[in-house]
Image: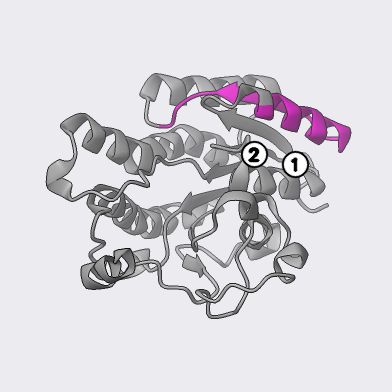
Amino acid sequence: MELKGRTVLITGSAKGLGKMTALTLAQRGCQVAVNYVNSEKEAAELVLQLEHMGVRSLAVQGDVAKREDIVRMVEQTASRLGPIDILVNNAGPFFRERRFFADYGVDEIEYLMRGNLLGVMELDHLVLPMMRERRWGRIIHFGFGKAAEARGWTHRAVYAAAKVGLVSFTKTLAEEEASHGITVNMICPGDIRGKNKERTMEEARLEIDEETPVGRPGTGEDVARVIDFLCLPASDFLTGNIMDISGGLDPIQPLPALNQRRT
C-alpha cells in the first residue's frame, strides 16, 4: 500500500478507463475524487463502491473545458480529501463523427482545444502548488496512439492538434517539475471502446481481435495498471514519457484506406 492516504483526482472517472483507474488506485489505499459531467448516478455508485473498499471518496461534477468548473473541482477535492497528490487527466472531448477541419464550427474548435489542452494545463497549474509544497506529485496526461510522432490525422485535426500540443507540454512540465519531486507522463490508449473500457485483461484474453497485432482487444485494466505503476513512489525516475498502450495497433489511417473501408 505504497500510496495509502494519497489524494487523487481523476477527471471523467464515473465510467470507462477513468473508473478502472479509480478502482485500481483505491486498492492502493488512495482517496479518490470521482469527476463526472452528466453521469451523476454512475459517479455516486462508484463512490459507494470505493468507500466499501475502505477509502474516502467523493463525486465532483465539472466539465474540463470550463475554467469555473475546473477551479471548483480542485477546491472541492482539496477541502474534502486534502491536497491533491495525484492528478489523472483522463477526460477530453472527442467527436466520433468524421469531419474535415473546414466543417467544424468555431465553437466546436474552441471546445475541443479547451477540453483536451487548455483545461488540462489549467488543472495542472492549480495542483502544482500543492504538490510542490510536499515535494511529491504525479501527473498523468492522456493522448492517443502515435501522438508523439505528430502525424497528420485526417478528420481529427482539432483533437490531434490539442493532444500533440499536450505531448510537448508533458515533456516540458516534466523537466520543470522534476526537482520538486513531481513526475509528469502521458499514456496513449489504443482503440479501446465500449464494454472493453471496464473489462479485465483476463476477460479480453478470451476474445480474438484481428485488427490488433497482439490478437486481443485492449481493456481498462491495461490502462489502469500502467497508471498505477507510474504513480508508485519507486517510479520517481520515470518522467516525461509518452507511452502507447495499444497492443501494437496504429490508430491513424490515411484517407484512401478510410475510403476503401467505407465501400
Is residue 52 a member of the stretch shown in magenta? yes
Is residue 165 in view?
A: yes
Q: Position of residue 146 (x, y in %)?
A: 38, 69
Q: Quadrant of residue 29?
A: top right
Query: For the image shown, how many numbered marks are present on the structure?
Result: 2
Is residue 121 in view?
A: no
Q: Position of residue 33 (x, y in %)?
A: 65, 31
Residue shown at 38%/44% (left/top)? 94
Residue furthest to the front: 263
Residue density around tag 1, few if under 14, some if 14–19, many if 20 or more, within 10 Å: many
Q: Which residues are drawn in magenta?
A: 42-64
| Label 1: which secondary element | loop
Please tell me whether residue 81 is drawn above or below residue 195 in the rendered image: above
Q: Which mark is residue 177?
A: none
Q: Position of residue 49 (x, y in %)?
A: 81, 34
Residue shown at 44%/57% (left/top)? 174
Location of mark 2 (residue): 8
Which part of the image, by quadrant, shows the C terminus?
Answer: bottom left
Give the CA separation, mark 2 to mark 1.
7 Å
The amino acid type, in three-letter code, at marker 2 is Val
The answer to which of 204 and 146 lies nearer the viewer is: 204
Q: Position of residue 226 (x, y in %)?
A: 63, 62
The amino acid type, in three-letter code, at marker 1 is Cys
Please tell me whether residue 196 is drawn above or below residue 255 in the rendered image: above
Which comes sooner in the sequence, label 2 or label 1? 2
The answer to which of 40 and 177 lies nearer the viewer is: 40
Asked if labels 1 and 2 touch by Cβ distance under 8 angstroms, the answer is: yes
Q: Which mark is residue 30?
A: 1
The answer to which of 201 and 245 lies nearer the viewer is: 201
